[in-house]
Amino acid sequence: MTTDAPTETAADPTKLYDPDDPRYYGYTRFQFRLWHGMTTWAFVKMINGRAKYISPQRYGLFLSVLLLSLLHSLLAIFVRIFYTGRIRRTQFAGDPVCILGFQRSGTTFLNELIACDDRFAYPDNLQCIMPESFILAEKRLRKSNSIMKMEKRPMDDMDMSMDAPQEDEIALLNSGVPSPYSQIAFPSAGEFYHEALEQQQSDPEMRRKWVRAWVWFLRKVQFRNPGKRLLLKSPTHTVRVGLIRETFPDAKFIHITRNPYRIFHSNLKLGKALSVTQGFEAKGMTDAQMIEELIEGFPVFHEAYEEQKAEVAEGNLVTVRYEELVRDPIAVMRQIYEALDLPDIEHAVPAMQAYVDSRKGYTPNTYKEDPEIVRMINDNWGIYFDAYGYDRLPAEGDAPPVNEAIVTEDGAAPGAPEDDPADTATTEVPNASHG
């Protein structure tokens, strides 16, 4: 058997396209997007007041989502007619286990590991992208595995198959519930991630609607997985600990932390990749937007979490470091299971180890730190440094640091699938940002 020689596009598409082109991230024009699982009414809610931001280059995306939403709406109506009673009678198999942590702190890696334990059920990509219609559509789609062809995430090398675990925040967004993730679709709308979360926490009516939509979705996932405890992961849940406890008083929480400089750089890549590949604006988020959001929003996010976590009962919350997780995943898993009094972990260790083995070979990016970025992080993110013991870098320095707090015995930085092995970057403060 012969194979074609690799082309430059296959080897490295980033050499052929600019960062404002979805092809830079391996996305074609006709590839499935997050919004292609929405119902019409959910899509209209998200578009409301934002249509002026849609770029002409994305009119085709808008039309395809709108047309497909009609099918999802029809299926959603049938779900309501034929399944509502059974879904409402579904009992949860205990209160859920929730993974917390700021985006790009290692929540996906942790979630994938625990999901190896077949005693847990989790919302997967198909269910979260098509939250109102998956009950009727999933059987055929899982067999075909072709319509929703998204094998890898645009910002890293993590699995995006239909069955891979996904954030339930995506399900709420695609159900028409106000979500900070709408910022991905319309970066120019001026809506800030942390402000959307603050409003959701402070408005009693929004809280009530959020809980109702969230529990309804979780019941559908539980309906498809009877007898299995739910495992949930959404960075947004980090500031909803109190709200989650009101709904599930005995919920368990796993909070993961990571080197703050690493979180910053990884989020710059995340925001750009998601907004360019998924959004309705051609250019996506700018560095200035993302830096402003991160510098201002990160401490607000963690102030809210620190206040709420104080009310969590002993034995229901454990905090782990990403650096320790990638260095010895199974040991950290054992610590988590023991701290939260979860079922005997030995049942799941073979599957967890197989997953770890499948992810070997990843190496994290390194960055030449811009002194102004370091200074801004040091000045504004003190709550995180102080709470979790990460050392501040000097604003000036000769040697570019490896941005992980813990390295392996041979001096190499630990690799993990949260990182893109091919990328090495220097981040500078754009002219429009804080100076």
Image: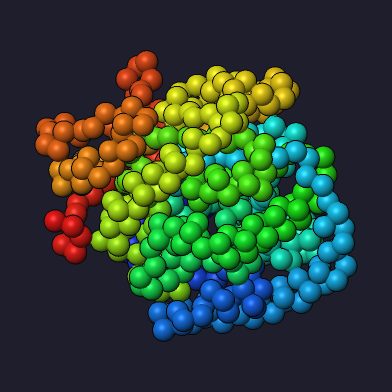
Q: Is residue 398 above or below residue 331?
A: below
Query: At 53% from the left edge and 49% from the top edge, which residue is drawn?
Result: 240
Q: Is residue 92 above or below residue 215?
A: above
**Residue 243: % across, % down:** 58, 49
* Residue 148 in view, yes or no: no
**Residue 163: % across, % down:** 68, 49
Q: Quadrant of the C terminus?
A: bottom left
- Displayed quadrant of residue 305: top left
Query: At 85% from the left edge and 71% from the top edge, which residue is drawn?
Result: 81
* Residue 188 in view, yes or no: yes
**Residue 55: % across, % down:** 40, 80
Query: At 68% from the left edge and 26% from the top edge, which residue is drawn?
Result: 342
Indicate left or right for 247 with 294 as reference.
right
**Along the line of sight, the residue nearer the viewer: 142 or 296:** 296
Query: At 50% from the left edge and 37% from the top edge, which residue is drawn?
Result: 309
Q: Is residue 251 above or below residue 5?
A: above
- Residue occupying the far top of the picture: 409
Q: How many marks?
A: 0
**Residue 345: % across, % down:** 68, 22
Q: Is residue 190 above or below residue 207?
A: below
Colour scheme shown: rainbow
Indicate left or right for 199 with 369 as reference.
right
- Displayed quadrant of residue 21: bottom left
